[in-house]
Every structure is written in C-alpha cells, then in structure tokens.
Amino acid sequence: MASSIAGGAALVTGASAGIGAVYAERLARRGHDLVLVARSGPKLEALAARLREATGRRVEALPADLQRPEDLLRLEHRLREDAGIAMLVNNAGTALAGPVAGADAARLDAMVQLNVVAATRLAAAAATGFKARGAGTLVNIASVLGLAPERFNAVYAASKAFVLALSQGLDAELRGSGVRVQAVLPGATRTAIWEIAGVDVASLPPEMVMEAEEMVDAALAGLDASELVTIPSLPDAADWERLDAARLTLGPNLSRNHAAERYLRGELPAEAGA
C-alpha cells in the first residue's frame, strides 16, 4: 500500500536520538518529508511533532525494533513497495566495548543482528525499490573503526567494515541505475551509543569527539559532492583516495592460478627471535 507521504520522503532508522535525529531535522529543513523509525514510540512521536511544527513537512513516526523479524519484514516491504520513499538513511546500530574473548555472546549476536543483518536487509530492500523506480539515495552509516579494527571491540569494527564493503559493492552494482550510494564513516561522535557500549565519552580526548550536528552536516556536504565514502573528520580527501587506489591496485594479483613465488621459494623472512 502506498504511503500517504508525498514523493521524496526520507526514511531514517535509529531516528529518535543522536545521529538519526539530527539527520531527520536536517533533511526536513532541506525539504524532505520523513518516515522516522526507532524502538521508542514516545520519543519518536515527540520528535515527529516537533519537526512537523518547525518545518511544515509531513513526518510519520514508525515505531519498530529491527531485531524483531516481523518489524524488519514490515520495513523491508515498505522500502521496496512505497514509491514515495526516495532516500534511506541506514543509521540504526549498537556498540559494545572491550575484548571479544570472554564477551557476552548474546550481546555480540545482538550487535551483529542489528549492525549487519538488519542493515543489509534494509539496504537490499531500498536498492531493489530504488532501482525499480530509477532513482533513490542510500546512505549507510559505518564508522572509521571499520578501517582501524585494533582500536575497539573487534566485532563492532568488523560490523562497520562490512557496512563499508556493502556500500562499495552496491555502488558498483547500481552504477547507471539512478541510485546513489554513500557510506559515512564517523569518528567518535557524541551520542548515547557510548553509554550503551559501556564507555564514558568524557574519558576520550576532547579533540577526538565530534558533535553529532557537525558530523551530519559534513556527511550531507559529502553527499552533495557525490562522495561514495565520506569521512567527516579527515582533513585531506586525497588520503582516502590513495588508500582506495592502493586497494584497487591489488586487484589483478588477489586471485591467480599459482601461489606467489615467495611462498614457493621459501623467501619469507624468519620469524623474529627464531
């Protein structure tokens, strides 16, 4: 069933607070109608009411828990079938600090389900709907920790590396279809995710922590510039471009019919101290 929201609506997950709430406010002020998704119905409706009054946009509050199969299915269907939705901000996620060895397996599983499984299914549903309609914008919120897995919980970092790879792969797949893809890699951002992860954000060096408003404004500027990968805190975009170019240079040698000569000729250096 088609939405009552007019064309050009943006669907934002994890929208009740933090990065998602800032995206909702910024997109409404840019002229988008909104579909806001989060677990907390009262918080979501309060934000929706405020944005309706402040911007005059049509804002739908859609409470959903993306770890519940029935809620995820409902949202996938909406993204595939509702021609009024032209943008997905795939933002919902969670975090866990500390080592993986000895971690609560249930919490690790919940993090993977939300950061990887739900994010993938929503991205796939949006890509399907947008491609069929010949237009749409998919924004996936990853993290710089996807590039620096040794600096935080390894499963969290891996989940964000997955989101980056998913975005790069989808961009290649959807090129020429009218669908735009952006992966946003924030650094430490002042949101409630730190409390969920078990970290006091005040314990971090203040020069590392960006406000959510500034992060989202930078991400939207990157979207306006048609960036595939936006790293809001990175001073020189050429640093990312060099890293990505080095990755692509590996391509011809990543899969060959023989092992590299250094393995066949015993040319590997002896282990230190051997």
Image (tube, rainbow, N blue to C red):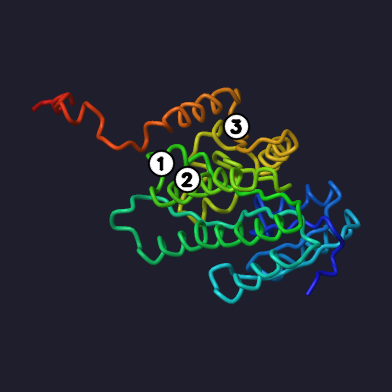
Residue 146 vs residue 3: left or right?
left
Of badges 2 and 3, the one in the foreground is 2
Residue 46 vs residue 144: left or right?
right
Which residue carries the number 1 mark?
149
Could you tell me the amino acid type at mark 2? Ala
Residue 248 vs residue 26: left or right?
left
Q: Are marks 2 and 1 in contact (CB under 8 Å)?
A: yes
Question: x, y percentage for residue 161?
Answer: 47, 45
Which residue is found at the position 69% from the left and 38% from the top? Answer: 214
Disc 2 packing (10 Å; few <14; some 14–19; many ≥20): many
Q: Residue furthest front?
A: 257
Query: Front-most of 121 and 107?
Result: 121
Secondary structure found at label 1: helix
Which residue carries the number 3 mark?
233
Query: Front-most of 83 and 69?
Result: 83
Secondary structure found at label 3: loop
Which residue is found at the position 72% from the left and 40% from the top? Answer: 220
Name the disc covering residue 70, or none: none
Of badges 2 and 1, the one in the foreground is 2
Question: x, y percentage for residue 228?
Answer: 63, 38
* First of labels 3, 1 by sequence position: 1
Residue 55 vs residue 13: left or right?
right
Q: Is residue 221 above or below residue 57?
A: above
Which residue carries the number 2 mark?
161
Secondary structure found at label 2: helix
- Determine which quarter of the picture holds residue 219: top right
